[in-house]
Image (cartoon, grey):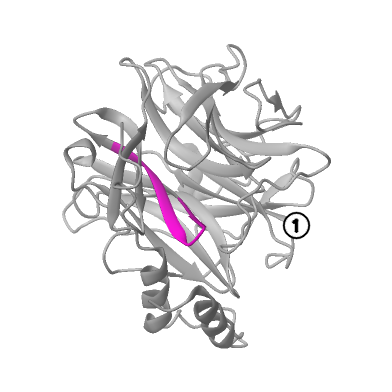
């Protein structure tokens, strides 16, 4: 496997602008090298479960004050809420409490499913949250109706002064910041907005300080990934007149396919998007795409980063959160199989002998 320094240098040498509005596709050899660097063939197993009545989902992992924390969501049959867990080694996780409960009234009365905002975006970075205005931030999917992802769903923001504490975060006073009914909503997002990932772009690639990627759906359609941008985290505008990533449904299929839960990392002079796919082939699985400009993406078409293979992820192995620490790549994902909906981990090295699962 090539070193990550070599990969970054290769990316820098290949990522020069072409002078056109659509940069050339990322070269196959670069895609292959990135795949080799992020692949996690060793499934460590389940690392977090909810109660018998719950489904848990969407792991987002960060470092703060020398410890690791996982923001994740739980569905109790009525709606989503956002929770926190902590770990000293990225393997053994202890739930600590709820950080974003359902509001019980208003636009997010029954759904509050959060994800990290403003984490250090560099693949070789610290994985720490970056404060803005002395606050730490999350973005979340919210809705007023009960049930599993019942439309319409919108996106809001919340903040805290200490992301390590299991205390309720403060909702932004101008929520929601994006909704399917907004006048500028694009055709692909006029039913539901799903998982969002907000990061700070110091290079202002799209002309703004903050960038949000999110997947969305039109009524009875596929889920696609689009972009919004902001200067202050409060006022957001859609970027472009369409989505930036989609996958096609198989010929003859009437079921919409999903491209969802984007996680964006900076890789040398490239951007890498980890995301999950579903239903353009059996099951749900994690994959990636690469871009020079955040708008034009080259999709990986080789082996999935994780895919169903074990009894506990036999149906779905999806919704990635991928990081590298101390030379090991950790791939957290939602597993659905004979243990219900749980959070699992795959790694680039076999860690099971050193720290067997309980």
Q: Is residue 180 above or below residue 94?
A: below
Q: Where does residue 149 sit, x and y in percent of width and height?
A: 41, 28
**Magenta residues?**
322-335
Q: Indicate the secondary structure of the residue bearing disc 1.
A: loop
Quadrant placement of the N terminus: bottom left
Q: Which residue is mark 1?
A: 209
The location of residue 76, given as percent across then percent down, is 39, 17
Query: Closest to the observer: 65 or 207?
Result: 65
**Residue 160 placed where, x, y %?**
73, 30
Q: Is residue 43 magenta?
A: no
Left or right: 3 in relation to 49: right
Quarter of the C terminus within the rendering: top left
- Residue 176: where, in percent of width, then height? 65, 32
Please give the name of the residue rendered at 56% of the width and 17% of the height, measured from the top-left corner: 102
Q: Say whether residue 127 is left or right of residue 53.
A: right
Residue under the point 34% across and 50% down: 351
Q: Secondary structure of the magenta portion, mostly?
A: strand
Q: Which residue of the protein is positioned furthest toward the top in this rendering?
A: 104
- Quick check: can you spot residue 234? yes
């Amino acid at each position: 496997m090539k070193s990550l320094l070599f990969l970054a240098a290769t990316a820098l040498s290949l990522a020069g602008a072409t002078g056109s509005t659509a940069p050339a596709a990322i070269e196959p050899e670069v895609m292959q090298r990135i795949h080799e660097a992020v692949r996690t063939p060793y499934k460590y197993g389940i690392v977090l479960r909810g109660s018998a009545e719950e489904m848990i989902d969407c792991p987002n992992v960060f470092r703060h004050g020398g410890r690791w924390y996982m923001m994740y969501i739980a569905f109790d049959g009525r709606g989503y809420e956002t929770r926190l867990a902590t770990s000293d080694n990225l393997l053994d996780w202890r739930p600590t409490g709820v950080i974003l409960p359902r509001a019980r009234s208003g636009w997010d009365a029954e759904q509050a499913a959060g994800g990290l905002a403003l984490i250090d975006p560099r693949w070789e970075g610290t994985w720490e949250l970056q404060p803005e205005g002395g606050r730490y931030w999350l973005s979340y999917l919210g809705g007023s109706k009960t049930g599993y992802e019942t439309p319409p769903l919108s996106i809001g923001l919340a903040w805290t002064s200490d992301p390590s504490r299991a205390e309720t975060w403060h909702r932004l006073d101008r929520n929601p910041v994006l909704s399917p009914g907004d006048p500028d909503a694009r055709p692909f997002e006029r039913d539901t907005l799903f998982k969002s990932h907000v990061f700070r772009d110091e290079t202002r690639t799209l002309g703004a300080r903050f960038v949000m990627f999110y997947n969305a759906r039109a009524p009875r359609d596929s889920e696609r990934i689009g972009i919004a941008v902001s200067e202050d985290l409060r006022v957001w505008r859609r970027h472009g007149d369409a989505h930036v990533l989609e996958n096609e449904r198989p010929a003859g299929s009437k079921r919409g396919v999903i491209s969802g839960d984007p996680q964006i990392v900076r890789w040398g002079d490239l951007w890498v998007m980890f995301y999950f796919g579903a239903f353009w082939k059996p099951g749900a699985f994690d994959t990636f795409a690469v871009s020079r400009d955040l708008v034009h993406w080259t999709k990986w078409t080789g082996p999935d980063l994780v895919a169903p293979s074990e009894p506990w992820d036999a149906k779905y192995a999806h919704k990635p959160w991928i990081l590298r620490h101390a030379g090991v790549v950790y791939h957290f994902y939602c597993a659905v199989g004979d243990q219900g909906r749980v959070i699992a981990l795959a790694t680039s090295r076999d860690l099971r002998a050193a720290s067997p699962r309980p």
